[in-house]
Amino acid sequence: MDKLKRALAGEDEQEEKGVMAQISEASTLSWSTRIKLFAVCFILGATLSILGTSLIFLGKKGLIIFAILYTLGNVLSLASTCFLMGPMKQIKKMFAKTRIIATLLVLLMFVLTLVCAFALKITALAIVCCVLQFLALTWYSLSYIPYARDVVKKCCTSCLE
């Protein structure tokens, strides 16, 4: 129908839209729907992370379930922002010059947490990786707040002096 409208209006079809632009146009959501989906995804992610943390004391099987739920919860919480700004814009922001190191650290910690739980099966190391995962996500999240990382750096250096 759109092609017919463009042809009748005399518009050229010289510029074909990219696949991502077509997907973006086809899946536009209202702002209230985006907020609701963000909230559901974020709350589900936080719930999985908390549930995973409570299962850590169940031994080796608990460790694997903990690592899966904790990491999946953090991935869902991180992905929830895609509903607010769209997936392509989110990916571009994640790999922007100012936060690429933080993004890579977060992704690395996701992988290391799962490796420590599945392959190595070392509880203490998996817990350390989860703590580092939390710190990496916090550092990544602070990159969206102007001057927040500078404030944290100054607070840490003043505490160490």
Image (spheres, grey):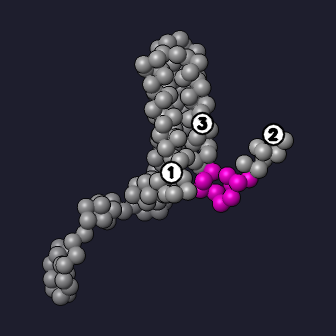
Task: Please give the name of the residue rendered at 39% of the width and 58% of the height, measured from the top-left corner.
Answer: 88
Q: Nearer the viewer, residue 92 or 65?
A: 92
Q: Is residue 79 magenta?
A: no
Q: Residue at x 33, y 62 (%)?
A: 24
The residue that disc 2 covers is 160
The magenta stretch spans residue 144: yes
Residue nearest the viewer, comparing 86 with 151: 151
Q: Secondary structure at mark 3?
A: helix
Q: Position of residue 9 (x, y in %)?
A: 20, 87
Residue in the picture at 55% in, 17% down: 123
Residue 3 percent coordinates (x, y): 17, 75
Disc 1 residue type (three-letter): Ile
Q: In this image, 93 relative to 155: left or right?
A: left
- Vertical relation: 123 (above or below) 140: above
Number of the front mark, 2 or 3: 2
Residue 33: x %, y % from top left:
45, 57
Q: Earlier in the sequence, mark 3 or mark 1?
A: 1
Q: Which mark is residue 3?
A: none
User: Circle 3 is placed at which residue position?
Assistant: 134
N-terminal of the pair, mark 1 or mark 2, is 1
Q: Amino acid at mark 2?
A: Leu
Which numbered dot is residue 100? 1
